[in-house]
Structure formats: structure tokens, C-alpha cells
Image: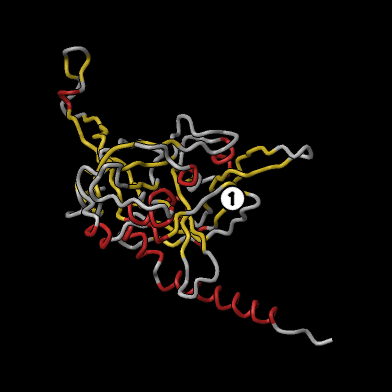
Amino acid sequence: MPRISDDIQNCTIYVYESQQDACTGNQAGGTGFLVEALSPKGILPHYYVITNKHVIEKATNKGEPIFVRLTCIEISSERRMTYKAKVMMLPASRWLRADSDDLAVCPIELSMSKYVFKVIPTKLFLTETVLGLKDIGVGDEVFMVGRFINHEGIQRNLPSARFGCIAQMPYEPVRIGPQEQQDSFLVECKSIAGYSGSPVFVWLRPGDKRRRETRDPEEFVRENGPWLLGVEWGFVPHYDYGYKVSDLETPISTKWMVHCNTGMSGVIPAWKLQALLDTKELARKRLQCDEEEEQRRLLRSLPRLT
């Protein structure tokens, strides 16, 4: 696996249910990341926070806001640049949750002069067409960038990367609860609490026959990745029952069970996220903003009367 671009690391943010948790770096909440979508006019970039529905559901069901933590740049009088964690509040009313997928999205306004951030453009989302054309499948390498809650950074966000490969294609839904199922890739990329909502990427490694070499950086990424494979929702659990729970050789109870991490993560396909971003509500708002900006630019271009 080659070095991961700082751009990808800086697309990741941290998600919390309270301002105090965000300020203190409490081991609660999950991960989110920033994406960019365009209207058909393509005039303005429109930024969104992406995470899992279950990460924000408890707070937003009560009408409470969600807090996200980004990295802010501060420049001193001596022209020294320092990094500082910055917390932003996103009202519950601004979040849009998918009906049948563990996905949530919220529009966000960010200034590149104040924050260290990058966005994943939707043109780098893995589509079912690219999946077929590039024959992406079991064994292809993936990596995930998210919040390692045991060492997440205090003065600034320090996302951690985990690595693995596609273990199973999303042919059948994966059970994620008593009555819930989720279309998912399974990836051999061990997850723990805190990584929910992390972006997962797939790419074609050097020497792969499907890889196309080109000097154009944008074309290179389009042809070889990394593409956004999807959004991590957690690990697939396994339950070991009572005979595994023992004091030396004596079982404590045959009715007890232990919740184990299988080391297999579930990843919601990127085309599911694309469908959420393309809902009428969000698409209409993007187009409206672009039309208003188009009018403003037209008015500025008109000659002024003296």
C-alpha cells in the first residue's frame, strides 16, 4: 500500500452528540467525512457532512444538534501557522436521513481560509458501472480513514488509517440488527467503536493489469482510484456463548454470551450515498443556490449608470 494522500486524511471529521464531548475528545460518537456535489449548472461547490444514521439518530430524534470537529488554521502575528480543533454545531433540522440505509447527510458551509479540509467529489464515488468496467471484486485492496478514539488527537484531528481487502461483494444484505438489514460490501478491515461513518476507498495497485498509467493526475485517479468504495457502518459481530465464558476451567453460565469482533467491516456502497445526495430536496437546493449565484454574477457584469 503506497502513502495515503493528506487530501484524503483531511476529508475526515469527528462527530459528537454534545459540545462538551467534542471539546474534550470524549470516547463517544463516530466519524464523518466531507463530500462535494454539484448542480447541473456546476457553478458553486456544495459541501456535505456524511456519517451513519445511527451515529446521529439518538440526538436528532430529540431535536438536539450534532457537533462536528474540524481542524482550524490560526496564524500568529509572527506569521506562524498553528492548528487548533474547531467545533461546529449542525442543527437537527438540517440533517437528512436515508429511509433504508444507515446513512445521514447534512449541508455545511466552510471557508478554506479558516479550516484545513478537503472534500471527496462525487465524481470519485465508485459506481456500479466502474465496478463492472474495472472488475472490482474480492481481493482488491481497500483502506479506511477514521477516528481511533483511543488516540484521536486533541489540539487537532488525527485520523487513523486501517487497511484490508474486499472479502465479499454486496450481493445479499447483511443483518445489522434484529429487524434491520443493510446492502454492504464486507471488507477485511478491522473496525472498532468510533470508526462508524468512516470513508472506505478501493484502488488498483501497481502491476495490476487493469491499471492505466497516465501523466494527468485527475485522469490517473479516475482510471485507477482511489475511489470511494462506501461508508463504513461497523463490524459484523459474532456471539460466543456460555461455555466460552469461564473462570479457569469452570463455566460461569451457559446462558451468557460474549459480543466479539469478527474483524469484518460492513461498508455501504458509494452509489447508495449518491442516491441520498440526489434526493429531490438536496438537488433542488443546489440548483436554487446556483441560479441565485448566476443572477448575482449577471448583475455584477452589467455596466453601472453614472
Image vertical order of residue 181 relative to residue 96, above or below: above
Above or below, 102 relative to 249: below
Estimate the x, y position of residue 169 in percent, counting from the top left.
Answer: 20, 50
SS state under label 1? strand
Residue occupying image coordinates x 53% and y 54%:
65
- The residue located at (26%, 35%) in the rendering is 263
Tell me if 66 is positioned left or right of 269 in this view.
right
Residue where numbered disc 1 is placed: 88
Residue 92 visible (yes or no): yes
- Front-lying residue, 49 or 128: 128
Rendering coords of residue 277 (x, y %): 41, 64
Q: Amino acid at mark 1?
A: Met
Q: Is residue 161 left or right of residue 303?
A: left
Q: Residue furthest right?
A: 306
Identify the image quadrant of residue 295.
bottom right
Viewer-proximal residue among 198 and 140: 140
